[in-house]
Amino acid sequence: MTSARLDDKLFATLQARAALIGVSLIRSEDERGHEVFIVSKWAMTRELSNSTDVEHLLERIGGERA
């Protein structure tokens, strides 16, 4: 793998924040082996490439609760 992976504790924190606002967050790899994050709410799914983008999306979806 060529990219740095997100720390497990930070990922667990993001995953918990997502769950509190009804969002599913999973960590995966793309076809090149780079870490990606899949965010889903209802029937909408989005692939993000880093934790900063995940944090921004959670803030937009959940407001201050995220």
Image (cartoon, helix red, strand yellow):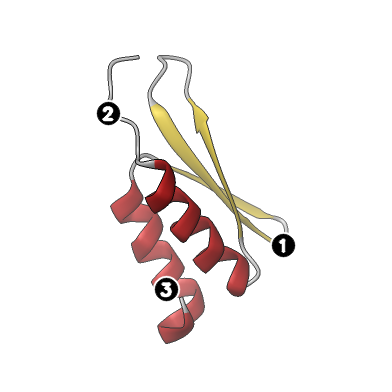
Residue visible at 33% across and 43% down in the picture? 50
Q: Residue at x 49, y 53 (%)?
A: 12
Ranked by sequence position, the earlier of labels 1 and 2 is 2
Q: Distance from label 3 to label 2 (Cα)?
A: 25 Å
| Neighbourhood count class around disc 1 (C-alpha, 10 Å): few under 14, some 14–19, many 20 upward | few
Question: Which residue is under mark 2?
Answer: 4
Task: List the residue tagged with mark 1.
Answer: 42
Amino acid residing under circle 2 = Ala
* The N terminus sits in image quarter: top left
**Circle 3 residue:** 60
Local secondary structure at mark 3? helix
Does label 3 or label 2 sit earlier along the sequence?
A: 2
Q: Are marks 1 and 3 in contact (CB under 8 Å)?
A: no
* Local secondary structure at mark 1: loop
Above or below: residue 17 compared with residue 47? below
Cα separation, mark 1 vs mark 3, equals 15 Å
Q: Is residue 14 above or below residue 1?
A: below
Looking at the image, which is closer to me, 37 or 16? Answer: 16
Please tell me which of labels 1 and 3 falls first in the chain.
1
Identify whether 44 is placed above or below 18: above
Residue nearest the viewer, comparing 2 with 44: 2
Residue 44 image position (x, y, % from top left): 64, 56
Disc 2 residue crowd, few under 14, some 14–19, many 20+, Cα 10 Å = few
Mark 3 surroundings within 10 Å by alpha-carbon count, few (fewer than 14), some (14 through 19), many (20 or more): few
Does 64 sit above or below residue 11? below
| Mark nearer the viewer, 1 or 2 | 2
